Image (tube, rainbow, N blue to C red):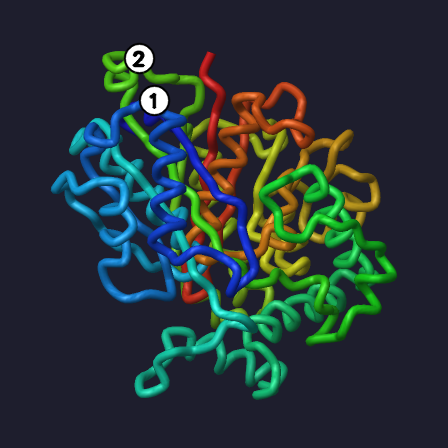
Amino acid sequence: MSRRVLVAGVGMIPFAKPGSSDDYDVMGARAIRAAVEDAGVPYEQVQQAYAGYVYGDSTSGQAALYRVGMTGIPVVNVNNNCATGSSALWLARQAVESGAVECALAVGFEQMQRGALTTHWNDRPSPTGRFNDLLDELHGIDATLPRAAQLFGGAGIEYVEKYGVDPRLFAKVAVKSRTHAARNPYAVFRDPVTEQEVMDSPHIFGPVTRLQACPPTCGAAAAVVCSEEFARRHGLRADVAIKAQAMASDLPGTFEKKSMIELVGAGLTRSASQQVYEAAGVDPHDIEVVEVHDCFTVNEVLTYEALGLCEEGGSEKFVAEGDHTYGGRVVVGPSGGLMSKGHPLGATGLAQCTELVWQLRGEAGARQVDDVTLALQHNLGLGGVGVVTLYERVS
């Protein structure tokens, strides 16, 4: 990375169930105002903006930004499936790092509809058609069930068979997530659940039950990034930086290995995280806190290993020993994750960013992890894209 990029300000609104939120432009504007205020920079000083959302018409980003102010800056609308928020941040970081601008804004928002994700364009090929073809080949497709649940459920079946683990492993992850969420006022689902309640909730596919699948929610989050020079000139806080960041797309092995685990993004995650560790000169065991893309409990387990937090096949031991929570080796999902906050697609990546910036600043309240110096973010979108970002506390 050619020059250090600071995260000067972050903002997030509490997520809400579909039908009970403000409209997307109102939510986006609220998050933008919060991030700009947190950074202490006048909105007019932002030189570029990247707006992430999945479900919405073109130029929805402008609609949200215009509620805050019309400054004539370039606005780029970003859609990269469930990794949209982090993709917007990736672009903003590149703009600052390259010297194209000194200060940029990334905002993500989503006004979700009730129920499972659906395809809105049925008159053309699906961008995930190859994924569906392999799912059909390996497990068959049940037209009555959500496709994502079948993809990740199929990966769960493969993981159980490959490593001989008890499927209750995935339920333990859901219990941990809800336990963390109880401390997070931004999470929608904060009530604790027991392992048995998770197992007894309605079955969906493979080891996945309803309490092991993230719900759709509405929300928004934003971040202001800038150069060190800009922060110094304007008297902005300079205590959190992006140490390294990588985005990866699929390689042929995603399909050629005939593996559901690879199909749902394990390879993407390995590739992006290895690039980050190499660029930063960091070992995954040096990291104290992580926000992962836990759209399903299965994916959180796969991500432990793909990020190198534990060895391949070692997640059962990792969870049993409590190394994924407070008092263990690393705290995964202090926010409660997607499982508890819900998953407003365009907002998720920037909500993860916000949580980790708060952790690095020591501003996470009751869920604060002790003495955080390095924080890792993982955001995944099938189709496919994986974004891994490493943040550091700047002394």
* Residue 367 image position (x, y, % from top left): 67, 32
* Residue 298 image position (x, y, % from top left): 67, 60
Quadrant hosting residue 90: top left
Give the residue type at disc 2.
Answer: Gly
Q: Nearer the viewer, residue 306 or 240?
A: 240
Farthest residue, direction left: 72
- Report which residue position mark 2 lands on: 235
The label number, if any, that marks residue 40 in the structure image = 1
Q: Nearer the viewer, residue 63 or 205?
A: 63
Name the residue: 38% across, 78% down: 120
Dot 1 falls on a residue whose secondary structure is loop
Q: Nearer the viewer, residue 237 or 385?
A: 237
* Residue 330 image position (x, y, % from top left): 68, 33
C-alpha gap between disc 1 and disc 2: 8 Å
**Total number of numbered discs in the rendering:** 2
Dot 2 falls on a residue whose secondary structure is loop
* Residue 319 image position (x, y, % from top left): 78, 46
